[in-house]
Amino acid sequence: MKHSSKNRLMPRHQALFTKETLFDKIARSVCRAGTLPRKELYEAWETARRVRRRYKGGRVVDLACGHGLLGHIMLILDNTSDHALCIDRKLPDNARKLSQTLLTDWPRLVGKIHFKEMDIEDITIYSHDVVVSAHACGSLTDVIIDKAIMGNARLAVLPCCHNLKTCPTGNLTPWMEPTLAVDAVRAMKLQSRGYDIFTAKIPDTITPKNRLLMGHPRSRDE
Ligand SMILES: C[S@@+](CC[C@H](N)C(=O)[O-])C[C@H]1O[C@@H](n2cnc3c(N)ncnc32)[C@H](O)[C@@H]1O
């Protein structure tokens, strides 16, 4: 089974996820909803579990959320978060269908997932937030980093679609591949703004855009 497949997981695919693990339970739920490309299930899971190892609690803010699976899994993995706010300029038509299916299987999430169709520019981030974002295209990742810094919040981004015209490479390209230079500059920016950072990768069998950048204000004891 290719984890990078963009084919939609459908109810019949539940047969692929038969184990009594949390991941398989989430996967069966996603299959029942019949809305999500397979790749997005793996991306959201691998991102959320790495973030939750570091950052517990807080309001989860899933920016450029698409279907919002990342926000849901963040709450499934940690019961101490009050709620998740899933923001996208244009929510996919079936985001709520996926959410309903997950809420049926995790009733403790009922009333804790809030979708909002709005521009990321208009969100206010607070210091108790955990900002997460998977594949916010190009410089949208930079907007998200700036929002988190402004709010003094914990942050995890999985950047994609690096736009070398709008995203600074810090003159590092003679030394490294340009998209890596963009992410290196992002990491250094967080550090220069008083953040401790952690870098990780999700498996490249899911996506080549697999660099996960996490950070929290140095003043916090994480
Ligand atoms: C590549 S998708 C990623 C979706 C999801 N996070 C995922 O990993 O599957 C990028 C998303 O960003 C949203 N988006 C783009 N610009 C935005 C903005 N300025 N404010 C809010 N959402 C935006 C798009 O509508 C789209 O759903």
Image (tube, rainbow, N blue to C red):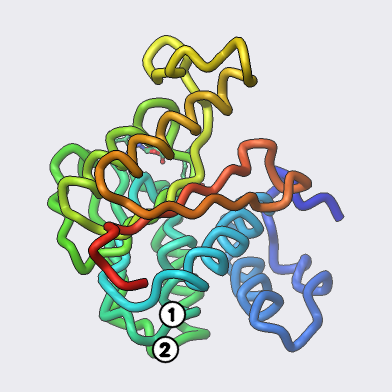
Q: Which residue is mark 1?
A: 103
Q: Is residue 27 left or right of residue 91?
A: right
Q: Nearer the viewer, residue 156 or 205?
A: 156
Residue at left offset 62%, top offset 17%: 175
Compared to residue 163, the image places residue 18 above or below, namely below
Q: Position of residue 56 (x, y in %)?
A: 38, 76
Q: Can you tell which mark lies on residue 63?
A: none
The residue furthest right is: 1
Residue 137 percent location from the top left of the image: 44, 31
Q: Is mark 1 within 8 Å of ligand 1?
A: no
Count neighbours of disc 2 (C-alpha within 10 A) and say few if under 14, some if 14 to 19, many if 20 or more: few
Name the amino acid, label 1: Leu
Callout 1: SS: helix
Q: Amino acid at mark 2?
A: Pro
Q: Quadrant of residue 64?
A: top left
Residue at 33% x, 58% y: name it.
Answer: 216
Q: CA distance from mark 1 to mark 2?
A: 5 Å
| Residue 119 versus residue 181 in the image, above or below | below
The residue under label 2 is: 107
Contact between marks 1 and 2 (CB within 8 A): the answer is yes
Q: Secondary structure at mark 2?
A: helix
Instruction: State the residue in front, 84 or 143.
Output: 143
Name the quadrant of the N terminus. bottom right
Question: Regarding ligand 1, which quadrant of the image does it lie in?
Answer: top left
Residue 27 vertical placement versus 187 (above, below): below
- Quadrant of the image for the C terminus? bottom left
